[in-house]
Image (cartoon, grey):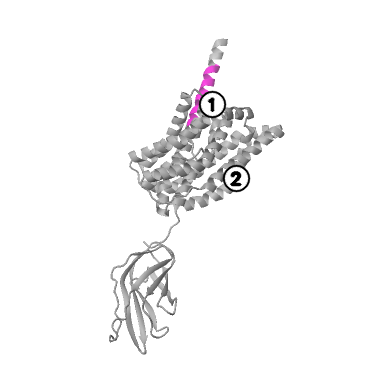
Amino acid sequence: MIRKLFTFLVLLFVTLGEAENSFLSFLNREKTEILLFTKTEETIIVTSSYREKRPNSSYLFVLLEDPKVLRVVNVTKTSLDVTNFTVNLVTYEEGETNLTIQLWDSEGRQERLIGEIKNVKVKVLKQRKSPFQASIHFDRNILMLILPMILLNKCAFGCKIELQVLQTIWKRPLPVILGAVTQFFLMPFCGFLLTQILALPEAQAFGFVMTCTCPGGGGGYLFALLLEGDVTLAILMTCASTLLALIMMPINSYIYSRMLGLSGTFHIPLAKIVSTLIFILIPVSVGTVIKLRIPEKANFLERIIRPLSFTLMSIGIYLTHKMGLMFLETLSLEVLLLGLLVPALGLLFGYSIAKVCMLPLPVCKTVAIESGILNSFLALAIIQLSFSQSKADMASVAPFTVAMCSGCEMLLILLVYKAKKRWILIVDDRRKKISLV
């Protein structure tokens, strides 16, 4: 398929032949490559080695089989010394048609056919907006509206940071190390293994592996707060894993693309990773400074964390599902199963490893959350930068599915946790009343 604006056709190779010949010999090419047109206006360049005896004596004639599909706007000679022509075309309806290209030369009142190409098949396919492009356009508009809320929420989380806890983690970084090992080594390998077991296509398999090798998402410290984990540790783990992603994501993309049999250059969105890190660090740091310098403002910000977080979480789940619905037509049972397994395995691995290392319960919760909630949109950026649009749309199903499933799973866990905690309080109250009686 020819996708560039300028499509080069070798029309014919003309030789002068012997001097006694009164005509030129030419080469007919009956079979040519199919031309694929996706834009409203297309251009092809026709070249020939034919040399004119008189200036501007030759011209190109293009005959179309079905003018409803394709029409010629104009034919322009691009140079005087050789017979090169530019053919401007306009596409109308989707479909297939054939065209014939003829090179003519006029000698006095007579016109002579120098050469031609017959049965050039043209397929017109109108370019549609990809689901990813439509979703990103929608996402940007909404993001601009909720951006102040996101920054305020991150600033409020900065007020929750305990400097003493931060110093303890700095001296004993085992939870951060465990999270990094789970995110960048264990999860990508499990993702690769599962895609091979389910025999997914290479593009979708790569999408899942890249999603599994992403750092912790911004929602990690939100759920750490709601599930009574260690908020300070969650913020530090998110920042550390995002920083490590600058090294580990290129390494994992290279390793697993070769294992999946994919060739080519994979573009890592380093600027996006750095901007994500800055987007976390700056408002959180501002919140920490407010807590040290203006404690009364910090108290106010801490009080609005929960309602603000619930609002942003609801908006985030809604937007993710709204964007993900555009990919449902390519969603298979295997993809849905993997989308459910990836965050669940991250939670299980993180909690189990932290429990084996005998870390406190809040720390175990935090390591599990940071391992299970991934920044899937970094994987989406890698996919869109590295593949053609058709393959990118297929591979993008993976990060969208994981994002949707992880949001639903964490919301379910939160509801079960709150219901269990409320039940325990009710049971304790009844026991106290019975003991008093």
Residue 47: name its quadrant.
Answer: bottom left
Camera-nearest residue between 408 and 163: 163
Q: Earlier in the sequence, mark 1 or mark 2?
A: 2
Q: Amino acid at mark 2?
A: Leu
Estimate the x, y position of residue 29 in percent, counting from the top left: 29, 71
Residue pointed to by mark 2 = 147
Q: Position of residue 400 (x, y in %)?
A: 45, 44
Q: Is residue 321 visible to us here?
A: no
Q: Which residues are magenta?
A: 413-429
Q: Is residue 325 visible?
A: yes
Per the image, the residue denoted by label 1 is 362
Residue sitting nearer the eye, 176 or 364: 176
Q: Residue furthest front?
A: 19
Q: Residue at x 47, y 42 (%)?
A: 249
Label 2: how many residues lie within 10 Å, few (<14), some (14-19) or many (20+)? few
Local secondary structure at mark 2: helix
Q: Main secondary structure of the magenta part?
A: helix
Q: Secondary structure at mark 1?
A: helix
In which image quadrant can residue 37 be found? Answer: bottom left
Residue type highlighted by circle 1:
Pro
Rendering coords of residue 123 (x, y %): 35, 64
Q: Nearer the viewer, mark 1 or mark 2?
A: 1
Quadrant, the N terminus: bottom left
